[in-house]
Amino acid sequence: MPHSPAFIFDLDGTLVDTAPDLMATTNTLLAREGRRPVDHAELRRLVGRGARNLISEAFKLTGAAVDPAWLEALYEAFLKDYESHIADASRPIRAWWKRLRRLSGRRADGRLDQQAAWPVHPAAHGLNLNRFFGAVSGGGKRPWLKPDPRLFAEIVAELGARAP
C-alpha cells in the first residue's frame, strides 16, 4: 500500500521566526554577566546548534569564553527566561503558515526541533502550530541532536511512514 508523503519540518527559523525572543533572552543573560548585547546579525550567526552552543559563542563574541563549569548554570537560567518569554515576539513565517493550513490532513507531517528543553516547544503551542503535526521530536527525547539521522528515522517511524 503506498504511503502518502510525510514532511518533517524544523520550527526555529523555518516555521517560526524565534530570533527576537532568542535575542532578548541571550541579551538578558549577557547583561546579568556584565556583557554587551549581541545584535540581530550576530545572533543569526550563533543560532542553530542548540542553546548551550549559543551561550558559549555569545560569551566568546562579547569578551571571553564562558567557564565550562559555569555553562550549565547559564544554560538553566537561559531556559527559564526563554520559556517565560517564548512567544512574546516570535511569529510564524507567513509563507509556511499558509502552506501548513492548506495541506493539513492531506499527509503526515512531523516536526523535529533542536530544542532539548521541551518535548513540545512552547512557541509552537503558544502560536497554535502543534495541530499541524502528527509527531514532534527533538533533542529533549534523546541524547543526540540534529542532524543525527537517528532522530529522522524515529520521527518517520512515529508517523507510520517509511523512509525512502
Image (cartoon, rainbow, N blue to C red):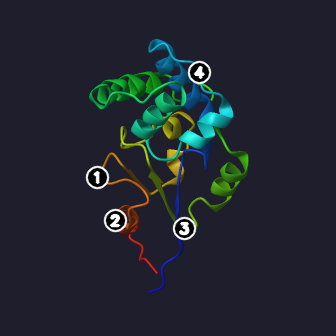
Name the kind of residue labelled 2 in the image: Arg
Q: Give the label, 1 or 3, closer to the camera.
A: 1
Determine which residue is flagged by label 1. Answer: 142
Residue at the spot of label 2: 150
| N-terminal label among 2 and 3 | 3
Which of pointers 4 and 1 indicates the residue nearer the eye?
Answer: 4
* Image point (48%, 79%), residue name: 3
Percent x, y of residue 2? 48, 85
Q: Earlier in the sequence, mark 1 or mark 3?
A: 3
Circle number at residue 37: 4
Q: Quadrant of the N terminus?
A: bottom left
Label 1 Cα crowd, 10 Å radius (few <14 / some 14-19 / many 20+)? few
In the picture of the structure, the residue carrying the numbered disc 3 is: 107
**Residue drawn where x is 59% and y is 25% of the image:** 88
Mark nearer the N terminus (3 vs 4): 4
Residue 45 to residue 56: above or below? below
**Vertical relation: 28 (above or below) 160:** above
> What kind of residue is marked 1?
Arg
Q: Amino acid at mark 3?
A: Arg
Most extreme residue toward the front, as rendered?
64
Question: Is 110 left or right of 95, judged from the image as shown?
Answer: left
In which image quadrant can residue 127 be found? top right
Which of disc 1 and disc 4 is earlier in sequence?
4
Q: CA distance from mark 1 to mark 2?
A: 9 Å
Mark 1 and mark 2 lie on one chain; the one further toward the N terminus is: 1
Are the residues flagged by discs 4 and 1 in contact, CB closer than 8 Å? Answer: no
